[in-house]
Amino acid sequence: MIDIVVVLRAEDAVLDFLSVLTPPPAASAPDDEVHVLIADSGVHLVLPPLTAPAERLGLLAAQVREPDESAASPGPGVLRASVAQAAKGRRARLWTHSPADNRRSRGRLGFDVAEALDTPETAGGTEVLHAVGYSPYLQFVSEIDRPLDRELVAAKLDFVNRHARHLLDADSPQHMIYTGRVPSAERYFTARQDERLRLFALLASLDDEAASVPDPWEFATSPYEAERLDATTTWVARFRDPADGPLIEVGACEGALTARLAGKGYRVDATEPNQIFRDRLTAGPGAAEPVRVHPDSLELLAGTRRLAGAAYLLIEMLYYGQDLELLTALPTDLLFVALEPEVLDTALRPWLATAPAWEIVDETVLVRPALETVCGGRAHLRKRGSTGVLLRRRPTTERGADFS
């Protein structure tokens, strides 16, 4: 059995896999090798059996590079070939990054390594273990936990200070090293393909990576999300009747809220710029009246002002640096905005203090924070709660467009 460590950069092997690189002598067979595949350079290092830890780390030190934002996974095909070349027909155990690593380049590599080995030719023959590593948002159920003794922790810190010190104050959030990224206990987990897909999608933003699985945020199965969506529907119904006119739901995703509103008799113009999400939305609640599906983003809606409605719904979507001044251009007198409390306090409230066009007419706690498992119990996290704020355009200001 050989161990193959697949990392994006050389320092990753030491930060998250030191216990794999330096197994205690009693745990090593005479022919045990550790191979390190470094994706950003294509380097393949072989750490011979029973080599002293200092010598092994010295080989890796020579491969530490300056930060490089272009560093990326070479893809499952290249990884499959590289692993096969390293293994040379021998039984191997793979160690790599977590698909949910919040540094997306590492998350993609960890995902691709497992995908590369999840083929009919290799199925059942190679175990893939993912490092929990630095996980600020998730807590994982792990299969292997390896606390490091003081000597190994000292070796890890010495490696960083001697060979990767330039990364301690790097400008790149992808490559900066700080305390949370230097664990004193290394933890690893395995994951089925469906778990890998969900973990990878869960940490993505609103792009095609997030849409790589249906319902990436588990709206259909999460008790927390069901409570939030039901409460949001009830909140909207307190202030708008279906007879008042259509609701414009911005960023409807796959239609979890859309379906609830349509079920209450509302006409909904659901907008979703992501093609994959929009296709699912169209096939779901958008498959029949009273839902119409549009590709417009918030920016396009504010710029064209083509969809007038009884109210606009911006529910859990103002997290991506949107210019809040766009809200004033929307062709409506009512805005339902829902956000987690921290973002509400740090983004929306300060903007409202300088936005004379709007006044708050209602504020409702839709759901309080909760701890909840994700990905079939593979991990858990704190859902942050949601507060609804209803904004009404002041009578002395003009609407973003004429209503006709």
Image (tube, helix red, strand yellow):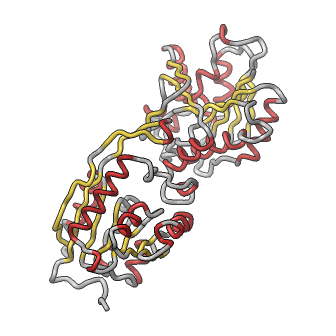
Q: Is residue 321 left or right of residue 140?
A: left
- Which quarter shows the C terminus? bottom left
Which residue sits furthest top? 26
Residue pictured at 74% horizontal, 23% vertical: 2
Q: Is residue 29 left or right of residue 139?
A: right
**Quadrant of residue 33 within the rendered picture:** top right
**Quadrant of residue 399 within the rendered picture:** bottom left
- Which quarter shows the N terminus? top right
Above/below status of 92 relative to 311: above
Residue pictured at 41% horizontal, 83% vertical: 304
Q: Is residue 217 left or right of residue 47?
A: left
Q: Is residue 106 visible?
A: no
271 or 46, which is in the foreground? 271
Q: Is residue 228 visible?
A: yes
Residue pictured at 76% horizontal, 45% vertical: 78
**Quadrant of residue 50 within the rendered picture:** top right
Residue pictured at 42% horizontal, 60% vertical: 256
